[in-house]
Amino acid sequence: MVATMSELTLIVAATSKMGIGLNGGLPWAGLRKEMAYFARVTKRVVGGSEGRNIVIMGRKTWDSIPPKFRPLKDRHNIIISRILPPVSDDGTTTIVPSLAEALKVVARGSRRAFVIGGAQIYGAALERPETKRILLTRILDEFECDAHFPIELGGNRVAEVGWKRKDMKDLGTWTGEGEAAEGVKEESGTKYEFEMWERD
C-alpha cells in the first residue's frame, strides 16, 4: 500500500513587506475578528474527516500564546521543539523534534493540517512538497517587525517561486467562509484582507 501525502496549509497574517512578528508577539493589536477567522478556519472539519484539525507551530509560537488559551481549543496542537521533551500524542498536544516528525502525525488522519508559525517553521514547511496552500491575512498598514514570512507573496517574483493567488470564490469555498471572506476589513484602525495562494 502506498502512503498518500498529507497536505499542509500555512496560515499567516503579514504586512505588505511580509512582516509577521515583533519581540516574540504580533506587531498589531485589537484584530479580534481576524483572530476569530483564524480560529474558525483552523477548527472547521470538512467532508468526511474525523477528529480534529491539526495546528503545527514552533516552541516560540507556542510560548507566545497566553497560557489560558493553550492548547488551542478544538485542534490537535503539534509543537516542534528541540528543547522541550517529546510528548506522545494524547489527542490534544504532541511535542516533536522536527517538521518531519510532525508530518508523521499528520499522515495518520484525514484532517486538515495548518502551519501557524513562526518564521523558521514557515521556512521549513515551504521547502516541503506537502505544502500546497497559504492562507494570508494581508495587513494593509505597515508595522515595525523583526520577523518576516520567508517569501514575498504579491511581489514581482512570486510566480518564479511557484505561487499563484486564487480568487475570492476559491478562498470562500475552501475555508467555508463564503462571501464573508471578501473585501477589505478594518479593526482598531488597521485594515486587512484575506487571500489564498496555491502552489502551481
Image (cartoon, helix red, strand yellow):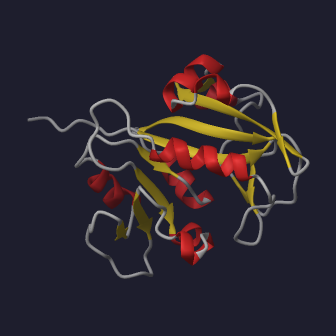
Q: Is residue 140 above or below residue 121?
A: above
Position of residue 118 measured from the top left corner of the image (x, y, whole percent): 60, 60
In the drawing, does residue 199 fall left or right of residue 4? Answer: right
- Residue 133 visible in this rendered orientation of the protein: yes
Quarter that holds the N terminus: top left
State the residue in front, 163 or 76.
76
State the residue in front, 113 or 73.
73
Q: Is residue 120 above or below residue 159?
A: below
Position of residue 170 measured from the top left corner of the image (x, y, whole percent): 56, 20
**Which residue appears farthest toward the left when viewing the image?**
1
Which residue is at a point 62% across and 71% down the rendered structure image? Answer: 64
- Residue 162 visible in this rendered orientation of the protein: no
Q: Is residue 147 above or below residue 48?
A: below
Position of residue 160 measured from the top left corner of the image (x, y, whole percent): 63, 27
Position of residue 78 measured from the top left corner of the image (x, y, whole percent): 40, 62
Which residue is at a point 59% across and 47% down the rendered structure image? Answer: 38
State the count of labels: 0
Q: Quarter-wise, where is residue 47 in the image?
A: top left
In the drawing, does residue 107 fall left or right of residue 137? Answer: left
